[in-house]
Amino acid sequence: MNAEAITERLLDRLWAGYCNRVPFARTYAELVRQKGGTVVNDHCAFRTFNTHTGQQTPGFTAIGHVLESLGYMKKDPYHFLSKHLNSFHYEHPSDRFPKFFVSQLEVHELPEETAQLINQAVADTPSLLAGGPEHSLAELKAKGELSEESGQQLVETLVGFFTRPWVPPLRSTVETVNKTSQFGAWTLLHGNSVNHFTAYINHQHVADWPDIEATIEGLKAAGVPMKPDIEGERGSKLRQSSTQAVTDRCAVREADGSPGELEWTYAYYELAERGYIEVNGERQWFNGFLGEQATNLFEMTKNKE
């Protein structure tokens, strides 16, 4: 099984799991197919902590390692100073596959109390890729393929990796961290889980949804709650909006150590419409991201109290 086949199976599994948790994405996909269009995702996003996370490599290095083993290449950096975030996006040589946008919270930049709470919550994280999976990733990166059995085993392991790797956080920790960083509270609850997928409007090929405005109106008509505005002006190189975020019942620990649940935001489904830029005299789609617009979209997972 070559790297592209493994990547395709992994993405199919991540997309299916995400659609189960985010019905707005499932509604979009169903409507596009009913209209004879094609569901194409522009990118997928992950969040993580740049701090000691037990046996898991800190920050976007852990997720980036997986992506690079699948054939992705790390591209441009992005900095969000007010939110204490740094990000990279990753692209695959084949345009069959979506990009990935991976962000890390710089925990050491937060107030001391907040940083200590996060550090305590993730300090004993196990490595979900230790042993055989790491060897498989190394072999895949070196040779570009694995046996059918090893490839399928790796897919199953990676599906498990893209969940919350640490034990459920204390309810009080989540609530306190949220006062300083909603990104931090979200990541404590959801870990390496998919933060969002993004529809690539340019490639959906729906006649009555020719642009992001029409797509938004179509989703509203279907009862999908949408972000009230669009990031980016008409004709610009990147325009983005999204559904509202769904909430989920998240596992936490109570003060006495007993298991509990906390209702919290999980994910939205983003929409992206890309414009042209000129590179070496040729017009091509803008393939990157814009920091200010991404900052506004980060806020879509802010918990509604």
Image (cartoon, rainbow, N blue to C red):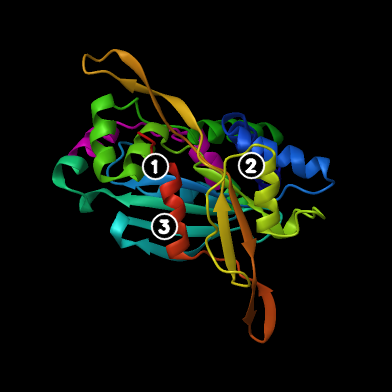
- Which residue is under mark 3? 295
User: Marks 2 and 3: which is nearer the front?
Assistant: 3
How many numbered marks, from 0 up?
3
Reply yes or no: does residue 208 show up in magenta.
no
Q: Which mark is residue 11?
A: 2
| 80 up-or-down from 58: above or below | below
Distance, label 2 to label 1, CA atoms, is 26 Å
Main secondary structure found in the magenta portion: helix
Q: Which mark is residue 302?
A: 1
Query: Residue 36: where, in percent of width, then height?
Result: 85, 46
The single residue placed furthest to the bottom in the displayed view is 281
Q: Nearer the viewer, residue 299 or 229?
A: 229
Crowdedness near tag 1: few (<14), some (14–19) or many (≥20) residues, C-alpha within 10 Å: some
Distance, label 1 to label 3, CA atoms, is 12 Å
Quadrant placement of the N terminus = top right
State the residue at coordinates (71%, 44%). 5
Quadrant placement of the C terminus = top left
Residue range (magenta): 116-138
Q: Is residue 117 left or right of residue 19?
A: left
State the residue at coordinates (41%, 36%). 191
Q: Nearer the viewer, residue 123 or 146?
A: 123
Distance, label 2 to label 3, CA atoms, is 25 Å
Q: In which quarter of the view is residue 157 placed?
A: top right
User: Of the residues under marks 2 and 3, which one precedes in the sequence?
Assistant: 2
Q: Nearer the viewer, residue 64 or 111?
A: 111
Q: Amino acid at mark 2?
A: Leu
| 291 up-or-down from 270: above or below | below
